[in-house]
Image: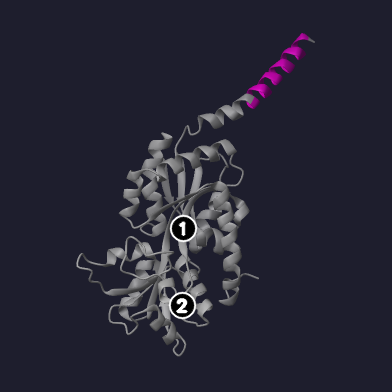
Amino acid sequence: MFKKQIVRLARIAVAMGAMIGGPAAAQEYPVKPIQMIVPFGQGGATDQVARLMAAPLEEALGQPVVIINQPGAGGAIGLSNLTKARPDGYTVAIGSDSTLGARPLMSETGYDADSFTMIARLVQIPSGVAVRVDSPYETLNDLVQALKTERLAYSGSGVASGPHLAMAVFLAQQGVQATFVNSDSNQDGLVKLLSGEVDFLTGGGSNFPALFGEDGQSDIRVLGLAAEERWSFMPDVPTYREQGFDYVNSQWFGLVAPAGVPQEIVDELSSKIKAMVETPEFSQRLEGFFFNAAYLGPTEMDGLVKEDMQNVRPVLAEIGLLKN
């Protein structure tokens, strides 16, 4: 009998220890390196965002942040892999408007918006459109008018990427069409533009400034940026609205984790990111890559993803990319 009481007391002690240890473990987070999945290859905007934030996040959390590139299926492979990770805050990923909002509506990705714990939106950039410097289209209106009588071709960083969808929405709004030629990256799309394979290029604004020399000369002409107001990195480029088109579109990037991460860990990560994004040092780092800081907390980011999904659904249906 005495032996049974000992065993029973031991079991109670273990159970109580587990109950006490749960919150303690969350409070101690993090105690080991954090893996950050980038669902695209090296060198693109998503990868740049991850590498920009890795070092300051390491400093804030006191643990290494290890970047793992897992490209494929327009970002779906990396994010699908994230959903299979333990929801303990030690595996996160960089998501975007297109990978979180559009991709699940196009194919069986293995995830939807509810598959993730939203941590924080980090940065955003305006969408834009460019042509070759010798193009006959000198304004956005020139391009739209040409599309009313001609079948032009354009490219960007992949089917249903942020740039592709931004332009698809704009074209649908104007009642015109153009042929999209797929590219593996913005750089690949730029090659297609300069070689004459396509007539115009859709891209995130951060892709354009580096293509201009100190004298302002370039092989491309940026016709417009879909920003609320003129973008500080390219103040000479008019917005779509200035040219008579009521269209604003930004591409954004944020941090996500698997669904079910404890709230204490979500709060810890989000608060550290908010403090990091608001520092002048981080803003300077972003400026070097032509990104704008645009922090949103978990609740706001979750709402943004669901809003993006609603907005893009009819566009995907119109261009034949909405899954059955």
Report the quarter where the N terminus lies: top right
Residue extent of the magenta highlight: 2-19
Q: Nearer the viewer, residue 87 or 308?
A: 308
Residue 297 x, y percent position in the rendering: 52, 47
Relative to 323, is 9 above or below? above
Residue 97 x, y percent position in the rendering: 51, 60
Relative to 263, is 11 above or below? above
Report the quarter where the C terminus lies: bottom right
The amino acid type, in three-letter code, at marker 2 is Phe
Circles 1 and 2: CB distance less than 8 Å?
Answer: no
Residue drawn 53% across the image and 30% down it: 27
The amino acid type, in three-letter code, at marker 1 is Trp
- The residue carrying mark 2 is 180
Residue 123 x, y percent position in the rendering: 43, 54
- Can residue 104 be seen in the rendering of this structure? no
- All told, the count of numbered labels is 2
- The residue carrying mark 1 is 252
Which of discs 1 and 2 lies nearer the camera? The answer is 1
Does the magenta segment cover residue 74?
Answer: no
Q: Main secondary structure of the magenta part?
A: helix
Asked where in the image residue 131 lies, by quadrant, the reply is bottom left
